[in-house]
Image (cartoon, rainbow, N blue to C red):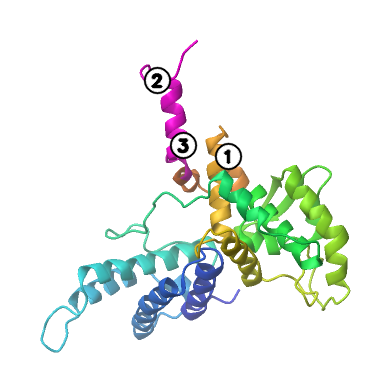
């Protein structure tokens, strides 16, 4: 297997930031600036494959950032700029490990600024309904787009997993979808009746019209683009983003937000965290535990139910 170059890993990471994370262009440009400097540093050290980067390389880069001075001998980079640059490096290497480009993350044991682990931004259930309601129409593309949004939310799928689905992966009668996640790991994901109905409508009334113009494509994809080829990750992201804009949910709407929302809503309604871990295809429970941070609604409900002076009448 040919090693993935650092340049190629950065290019894949940029696509992930746009498609999976749905970051704004300015945020993506900031990552690119930070990583361009990092790639140049590694190149000067003769490190050109992402799986060859060591902890020593990353430590040396951090030292280089702190030691850099301008023509007047003053620090070239402010502490906040250095912290941001190292977050970009950590994010790249974590992505490379998760995608199988490298066997390990060389930044894992390093001290210093880490990638923030804040509470994921999830939609409310009312906002999800508004988003689904914004995908209207009975033409082939509208039927496809509704099936895309419904399936992403129903199964908590990553956009790459969704566009990678083949028709053989669907069991609509049983309400199950076979998904191939990171590292081609297979899992079975249940989906509810609304998503099954949207998929059925698309497969019977939408997909045939797109398939009639079908291009040569590998496999038997569920979701087709307007030329009959497999829907791309970028096109899937655009479908969700535009639906979010029509629903008044703002610029940050992305498939990743739907995935967060699926997990958060399941936990809000009492799902076991290990069930959610299995559904999302997380290799580590610690990743799923990000969602266990209590939402305001769950906190309020627990307070009203349990506190003796909450004001709620008791039987």
Q: Is residue 281 visible?
A: no
Q: Nearer the viewer, mark 1 or mark 3?
A: 3
> Which sits earlier in the primary sequence, circle 1 or circle 3?
1
Marking on residue 311: 2
> Which sits earlier in the primary sequence, circle 2 or circle 1?
1
Q: Which residues are magenta?
A: 291-315
Tell me if 293 is positioned left or right of 208 in this view. left
Q: Is residue 171 visible?
A: yes
> Which sits earlier in the primary sequence, circle 2 or circle 3?
3
Q: Residues within 10 Å of mark 2 (few under 14, many from 20)?
A: few
Q: Mark 1 = which residue?
A: 266
Give residue 140's quadrant in the image: bottom right
Q: Secondary structure at mark 3?
A: helix
Relative height, residue 82 to residue 265 (above, below): below
Relative height, residue 222 to residue 278 (above, below): below
Q: Secondary structure at mark 2?
A: loop
Q: Secondary structure at mark 1?
A: helix
Q: Nearer the viewer, mark 2 or mark 3?
A: 2
Residue 29: x and y, percent?
42, 77
Residue 212: x and y, percent?
89, 74
Q: Nearer the viewer, residue 11 or 315?
A: 315
Marking on residue 178: none
Tell me which residue sits at (79%, 52%) in the image: 170
Tell me which residue sits at (72%, 43%) in the image: 192
Look at the numbered discs 2 and 3 and tell me whether their residues touch, using CB distance below 8 Å: no
Residue 243: x and y, percent?
62, 62
Tell me if residue 283 is in the magenta stretch: no
Tell me which residue sits at (29%, 60%) in the image: 113
Q: Residues within 10 Å of mark 1 (few under 14, many from 20)?
A: some
Q: Mark 3 = which residue?
A: 297
Tell me if 262 is positioned left or right of 136 in this view. left
Cα distance between the residues tagged 1 and 3: 13 Å
């Amino acid at each position: 297997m040919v090693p993935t170059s650092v340049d190629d890993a950065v290019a894949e990471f940029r696509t992930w930031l746009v498609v999976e994370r749905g970051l704004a262009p300015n945020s993506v440009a900031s990552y690119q600036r930070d990583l361009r400097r990092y790639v140049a540093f590694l190149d000067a050290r003769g490190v050109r494959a992402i799986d060859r980067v060591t902890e020593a390389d990353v430590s040396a880069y951090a030292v280089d950032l702190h030691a850099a001075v301008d023509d007047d001998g003053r620090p070239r980079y402010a502490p906040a700029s250095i912290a941001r640059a190292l977050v970009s490096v950590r994010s790249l290497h974590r992505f490379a490990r998760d995608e199988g480009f490298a066997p390990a993350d060389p930044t894992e044991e390093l001290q210093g600024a880490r990638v923030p682990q804040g509470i994921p931004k999830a939609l409310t259930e009312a906002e999800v309904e508004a988003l689904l309601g914004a995908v209207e129409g009975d033409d082939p593309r509208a039927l496809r787009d509704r099936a895309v949004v419904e399936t992403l939310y129903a199964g908590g799928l990553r956009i790459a997993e969704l566009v990678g689905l083949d028709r053989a992966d669907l069991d609509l009668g049983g309400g199950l979808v076979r998904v191939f996640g990171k590292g081609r790991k297979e899992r079975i994901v249940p989906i509810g009746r609304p998503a099954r109905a949207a998929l059925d409508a698309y497969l019977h009334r939408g997909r045939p019209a797109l398939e009639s113009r079908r291009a040569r494509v590998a496999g038997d994809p569920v979701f087709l683009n307007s030329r009959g080829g497999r829907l791309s990750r970028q096109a899937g992201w655009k479908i969700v983003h535009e639906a979010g804009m029509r629903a008044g949910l703002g610029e940050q709407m992305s498939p990743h937000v739907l995935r967060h929302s699926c997990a958060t809503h399941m936990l809000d309604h009492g799902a076991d965290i290990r069930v959610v871990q299995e559904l999302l295809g997380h290799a580590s429970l610690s990743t799923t535990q990000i969602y266990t941070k209590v939402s305001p609604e769950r906190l309020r409900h627990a307070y009203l139910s349990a506190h003796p002076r909450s004001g709620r009448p008791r039987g």
